Image (cartoon, coloured by chain):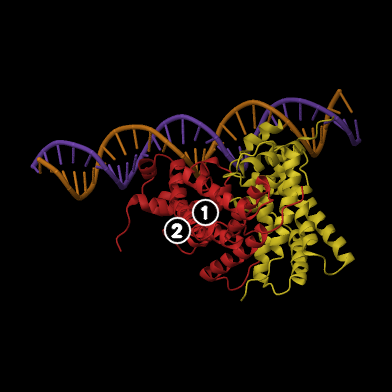
Chain colours: A red, B yellow, C orange, D purple
Amino acid sequence: MATPDTRTQILDAAEHLFAEHGYRGTSVRAITKLAGANLAAVGYHFGSKAELMAAVARRVVEPITAAQCAGLDKLLARTPDPPVGELVEAFAGPLFDEMPAGDEGGARTSRLIVTILSDPAEEARSWTGPAEDSVRERYFAAFARVLPGLSPEELWFRMRGIFAVTAVDRLQVHQQPSPGCASPIAGEASRRWAITFLTAAMSAPPIRP
Amino acid sequence: MATPDTRTQILDAAEHLFAEHGYRGTSVRAITKLAGANLAAVGYHFGSKAELMAAVARRVVEPITAAQCAGLDKLLARTPDPPVGELVEAFAGPLFDEMPAGDEGGARTSRLIVTILSDPAEEARSWTGPAEDSVRERYFAAFARVLPGLSPEELWFRMRGIFAVTAVDRLQVHQQPSPGCASPIAGEASRRWAITFLTAAMSAPPIRP
DNA sequence: GTTTGAATGAAACGAACGTATGAATCAAGC
DNA sequence: GCTTGATTCATACGTTCGTTTCATTCAAAC
């Protein structure tokens, strides 16, 4: 196969390393070395390390956002009040499905997502566009409609809970070394575990005020 | 009040900064400056930055682990099959209750915990002792007893979900700017939201095999 | 008063970082 | 063949990092 251009190889390498070691734990030198490119290539193609991080984040998140949006469209075309479980699946499912370009299993994607969401370095998080805000607000409205009685604050808390649980693979500390955790199987199982877990959680009655 | 000794002031400052900016985002210079101590004091009192991180983590986590352990003892003394909600509360509650020594609201603790759990730098995570393993395994056994039919893998997934949701405050990206989110109120509300959310989630039926 | 050991202070070390510079390379257009 | 613009290259700059060194301070012991 033809080797992709330098820009793409840098994106792949950066995606890999940012997911593994976070923004600050990854040096431009390590990225270009893994990509087989020159140190100055990052500056040339992306401008700076922060802009490279933004490009990586966009490349990973854009298809997820699109899938979330399409899933909601499909659901709402059928009925304005879809079951909670289907809303959860449409929202959280794409976080499992989407694979990184280089790919060696979906686990890397979820690790990158939690880096994007929770990395202490602001550079890792200051990239979102209006598309992400929009799809999140549409889901918020949909959940609010099928879960009446929930205060906006509690509903936002629960939606953040979806992100948190989805990213749970990253919290590998305290994780029992489970035998036979082959990547694709465990990935598909995680997906079903998460949907089950989150559907029940989202459906919980509101706390009494 | 008498100013505490240098060692304690460094611990307080480090706890603050590690929670805010993560392990790699916090420099020893920033810590000693905030603590009003000399740069070399970290080396003298703790040996290295990594050992300082471990000391900070231990100081925060030890009372939490103790409270989790005591809560489980109390519960199991009453009945071998406590309700799921009470198990969740005994496990997750201390993650909200415990306050850092310096303290300016409990939010900082949960942020530090998520740093401890998910910081990409291994130094932030390589400190756990047998006490943490033990209490986690005891809760695992208790949950397994009251949630029969759940595979061990799915139960571990759900327990990691508890950590994830508890740490959800840290995922401030994508967070709606909610008016009037005074710290103590929001903290207590978060606790109740989380317990509700997680009790429903833990009680979900297992996925069909 | 002198000694002693813990604690603090000022300064410097080498390494690694992100970024910038300017020459070298290369394919396409004329 | 020459030019041009895009890309790659080796290299260096200035900064910041964690750590170390060694002199100094200081309270208690003798």
Q: Position of residue B117 (x, y in %)?
A: 65, 53
Q: Where is residue A50 in the image (x, y as percent from the top left)?
A: 47, 41
Q: Which residue reaches farthest bottom?
A: B209
Give whichever of B208, B99 is nearer the camera: B208
Q: In this view, does B13 lie to the left or right of A9?
A: right
Q: In this view, does C21 lie to the left or right of B203?
A: left
Chain ID, mark 1: A
Q: Is residue B115 visible?
A: no
Q: Is residue A14 left or right of residue B161?
A: left
SS of the residue under disc 2 = loop
Chain ID, mark 2: A
Few, some or many residues within 10 Å of mark 2 (<14, 14–19, 20+)? many
Q: Is residue A71 left or right of residue A47?
A: right
Task: Identify the mark at residue A112; answer none if there is no mark.
Answer: 1
Quadrant where the image shows the C terminus of chain B: bottom right
Residue where numbered disc 2 is placed: A100
SS of the residue under disc 1 = helix
Q: Which residue reaches farthest front?
A: A79
Give whichever of A163, A76 is nearer the camera: A76
